[in-house]
């Protein structure tokens, strides 16, 4: 696997169209709060345990898979999927990740280098609303997964973001989303403090259909996260019925 893109690349300091301006607020937030994000959500809230447990249960890796982590941040999802692929002795895997915030990518890149995985996991900087920035051969994925990123996309741009991700999938590929459900706790913690959009049950299904997905499955977390994790919705979208 090539390592040509292992350094987060520049997307351009200023947004090129008004839709991208809203995204710069998210970039600023995660640039300023990179360490705080990890302290609050990983160390205190243990958010990563829920996602890792889900991925392990779903056993979503097999040899020769191409996987893209959209809004990968510091790599939570890719790290877990890579670990699972190693456990299962999967071969010929492709792991790509992109994110808007260089500080988050830098944290992921440090982990990649420390674990000598530069030839296995590639990351780059890109905005989900403007995926022309991705390398030409970043396409035809079996799995595109995105955790807690769509919360930062302006509501009127969500279908565009989902269509962009859909465009990177193989015909029989699937999109796996983790998104924050609106409730009393998330409204304050994630909505107000972390300036994220929250979702009502069912909203994202409609958007996925508008983006071309014909089969949408609500996925369940296993115990104990099924009960504790009332704040995260997991959905899988496929093109086929
Ligand atoms: C809550 S963090 C989630 C990071 C990682 N997926 C995880 O689960 O730990 C949200 C991430 O979305 C990224 N993000 C926000 N808007 C984005 C956009 N328009 N394009 C790509 N990434 C974006 C942020 O930079 C941040 O790293």
Image (spheres, grey):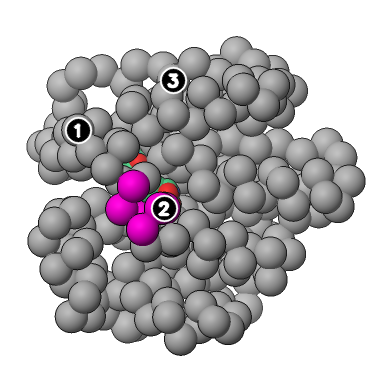
Where 61 falls versus 69 (above or below)? below
Q: Position of residue 64 (x, y in %)?
A: 81, 44
Foreground of the two, 193 or 42: 42
**CB at disc 1 and ligand 1 closer than 8 Å:** no
Who's the residue at 53% across and 62% down the image?
A: 49
Give the CA distance from mark 2 to mark 3: 23 Å
Q: Is residue 153 visible?
A: no
Q: Quadrant of ligand 1?
A: top left
Q: Which image quadrant is residue 107 in?
A: top left
Distance between the alpha carbons at the discs numbered 2 and 1: 17 Å
Is residue 84 shown left or right of residue 216? right
The majority secondary structure of the magenta stretch comes to helix
Q: Do tag 2 and tag 1 residues touch (Cβ < 8 Å)?
A: no
Name the residue beneath numbered marker 2.
42
Element assignment for label 3: loop
User: Badge 3: how crowded within 10 Å, few (<14), some, or many (20+)?
Assistant: many
Query: Disc 2 beta carbon < 8 A from ligand 1?
Result: yes
Say which residue label 1 marks: 32
Q: Is residue 112 above or below residue 76?
A: above
Asked if residue 172 lies in the magenta stretch, the reply is: no
In magenta, the rendered stretch is: 39-44
The reply to whether discs 1 and 3 touch (Cβ–Cβ < 8 Å) is no
Q: Residues within 10 Å of mark 1 (few under 14, many from 20)?
A: few
Asked where in the image residue 5 lies, by quadrant, the reply is top right
Name the residue: 30% across, 36% down.
Answer: 34
Which callout, 2 or 3, points at the residue further toward the start of the chain?
3
Residue 70: x and y in percent read: 46, 45
Which badge, 2 or 1, is on the more N-terminal residue?
1
- What residue lies at 78% left-to-right and 48% top-to-bottom? 85
Q: Which residue is mark 3?
A: 8
């Amino acid at each position: 696997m090539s390592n040509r893109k292992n350094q987060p690349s520049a997307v351009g300091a200023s947004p090129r169209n008004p839709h991208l301006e809203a995204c710069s607020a998210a970039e600023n937030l995660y640039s300023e709060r990179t360490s705080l994000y990890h302290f609050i959500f990983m160390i205190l809230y243990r958010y990563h345990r829920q996602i890792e447990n889900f991925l392990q249960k779903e056993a979503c890796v097999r040899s020769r898979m191409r996987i893209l982590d959209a809004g990968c941040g510091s790599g939570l999802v890719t790290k877990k999927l890579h670990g699972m692929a190693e456990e299962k002795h999967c071969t010929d895997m492709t792991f790509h990740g992109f994110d808007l915030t260089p500080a988050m990518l830098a944290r992921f890149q440090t982990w990649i280098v420390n674990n000598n995985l530069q030839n296995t996991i590639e990351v780059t900087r890109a905005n989900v609303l403007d995926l022309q920035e991705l390398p030409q051969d970043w396409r035809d994925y079996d799995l595109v997964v995105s955790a807690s990123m769509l919360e930062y996309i302006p509501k009127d741009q969500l279908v565009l973001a989902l269509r962009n991700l859909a465009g990177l999938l193989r015909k029989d590929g699937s999109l796996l989303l983790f998104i924050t459900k609106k409730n009393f706790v998330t409204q304050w913690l994630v909505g107000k403090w972390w300036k994220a959009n929250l979702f009502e049950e069912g909203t994202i299904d409609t958007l996925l259909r508008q983006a071309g997905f014909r089969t949408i499955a609500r996925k369940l977390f296993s115990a104990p996260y099924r009960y504790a994790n009332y704040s995260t919705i997991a959905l899988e979208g496929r093109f086929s019925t």
